[in-house]
């Protein structure tokens, strides 16, 4: 049920209460985040309580194969707060898979993914919901600045957005992460997309729908350490580009045409020189350079093709994106 057809009834205190719509679901992927769970709940719970007269909530944690006390802490909190649910994956499948698991199991009329490290401020949730109730199907939360990130991370992130949007068939909004709100209709559309190599930001943009936007200041991480190394970010960037565009393949068609033309031109020049001046056999250096350059370009082109072939192999095996070890749904529901 979307925001446009929610029926409100007047409560005893004069506040409008939603009696028919399911709760808004917060999806929180976690991996070895025992240091962040208590701080997150301590910050998000008062925010949700302030909105609760109008809308109720479900907090759905997705435990992505944590090896520390993350699962135990969440279950302990769930025993005290009936709105908390938990999905345990059988191993670490990665954040993209964990977020997809949350989307497929969310019960809310609207869904909000956010990080447990509090870099996605819970205070922004009320603004997202207001835009949704006003009719937006998607409400993006855009970071005003990335001062909390290192210089290298800011540069690489900006470069990625420029490269991705130049190549992708459907661009993604810059400085908008997973933190945003989706209407149930959008969530259902996203869950219909069956690819195994998932880059969620691109999928979120691909499905379309009416989008609104709010901005926020992104604070530093409240506790724990980020699990995103530069190598993991690099692999995620490659997944995003190769899963969202065939332009890298098409580029090599044009590069091949240019190289073929250059080769024919060079061959003609050598032919004319040989006819007019004879063949004095020099040219070892130029020949070696040409071999190395063309060999390097060919290897790079084969690497691009290999990236796509590898993803084809992943898709045709049709393995599940994730495997659920156990599911502890929230005991509270408005259905």
Image (cartoon, rainbow, N blue to C red):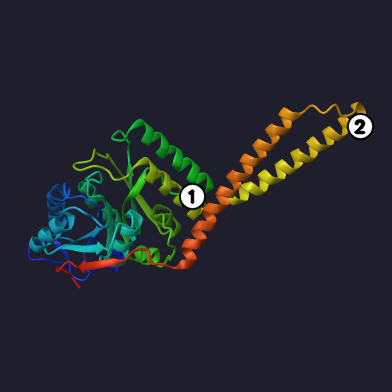
Residue 31 position in % (x across, y down) = 25, 52
Say whether residue 261 is left or right of residue 154.
Answer: right
For label 1, the residue is: 241
Looking at the image, do the residues carrying marks 1 and 2 touch, with CB atoms under 8 Å apart?
Answer: no
**Residue most extreme to the right:** 276
Which quadrant of the figure has residue 277? top right
Q: Is residue 276 visible?
A: yes
Q: Is residue 135 visible?
A: no
Residue at 43%, 58% (x, y): give it: 197
Residue 204 position in % (x across, y down) = 40, 56
Which quadrant of the figure has residue 15? bottom left
Mark 1 surroundings within 10 Å by alpha-carbon count, few (fewer than 14), some (14 through 19), many (20 or more):
many
Say whether residue 292 is left or right of residue 276.
Answer: left
**Residue most extreme to the bottom:** 335
Say whether residue 115 is left or right of residue 231.
Answer: left
Closer to the camera in the image, 80 or 308: 308
Element under disc 2: helix
Residue 218 position in % (x across, y down) = 27, 40
For label 2, the residue is: 275
Instruction: Give the spatial CA distance, label 1 vs label 2.
Output: 49 Å
Q: Quarter of the image containing the N terminus? A: bottom left
Say whether residue 320 is left or right of residue 326.
Answer: right
Mark 2 surroundings within 10 Å by alpha-carbon count, few (fewer than 14), some (14 through 19), many (20 or more):
few
Residue 35 position in % (x across, y down) = 16, 46
Taking 29 as reference, is 229 above or below it?
Answer: above
Residue at 28%, 35% (x, y): give it: 148
Q: Quarter of the image containing the C terminus? A: bottom left
Tell me which label, 1 or 2, sits earlier in the chain. 1
């Amino acid at each position: 049920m979307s925001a446009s057809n929610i029926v409100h009834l007047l409560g005893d205190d004069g506040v409008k209460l939603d009696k028919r719509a399911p709760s808004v679901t917060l999806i929180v992927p976690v991996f070895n985040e025992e240091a962040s769970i208590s701080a997150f709940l301590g910050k998000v719970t008062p925010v949700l309580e302030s909105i609760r007269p109008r809308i109720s909530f479900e907090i759905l944690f997705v435990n992505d194969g944590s090896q520390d006390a993350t699962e135990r802490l969440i279950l302990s909190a769930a025993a005290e707060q009936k709105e908390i649910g938990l999905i345990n994956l059988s191993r670490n499948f990665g954040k993209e898979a964990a977020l997809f698991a949350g989307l497929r199991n969310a019960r809310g009329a609207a869904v909000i993914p956010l990080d447990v490290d509090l870099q996605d401020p819970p205070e922004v949730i009320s603004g997202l919901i207001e835009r949704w109730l006003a009719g937006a199907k998607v409400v993006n939360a855009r970071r005003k600045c990335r001062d909390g990130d290192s210089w290298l991370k800011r540069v690489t992130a900006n470069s990625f957005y420029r490269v991705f949007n130049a190549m992708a068939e459907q661009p993604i909004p810059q400085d908008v992460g997973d933190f945003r709100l989706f209407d149930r209709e959008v969530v259902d559309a996203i869950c219909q997309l069956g690819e195994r190599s998932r880059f969620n930001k691109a999928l979120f943009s691909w499905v379309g729908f009416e989008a609104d936007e709010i901005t926020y200041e992104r604070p530093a991480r409240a506790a724990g350490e980020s699990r995103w190394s530069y190598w993991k970010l690099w692999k995620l960037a490659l997944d995003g580009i190769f899963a969202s565009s065939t332009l890298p393949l098409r580029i090599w068609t044009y590069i091949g045409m240019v190289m073929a033309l250059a080769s024919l031109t060079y061959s003609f020049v050598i032919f004319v020189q040989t006819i007019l001046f004879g063949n004095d056999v020099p040219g070892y250096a130029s020949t070696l350079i040409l071999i190395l350059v063309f060999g390097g370009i060919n290897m790079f082109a084969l690497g691009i093709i290999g990236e796509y072939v590898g993803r084809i192999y992943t898709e045709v095996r049709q393995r599940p994106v994730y495997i659920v070890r156990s599911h502890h749904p929230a005991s509270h529901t408005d259905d």
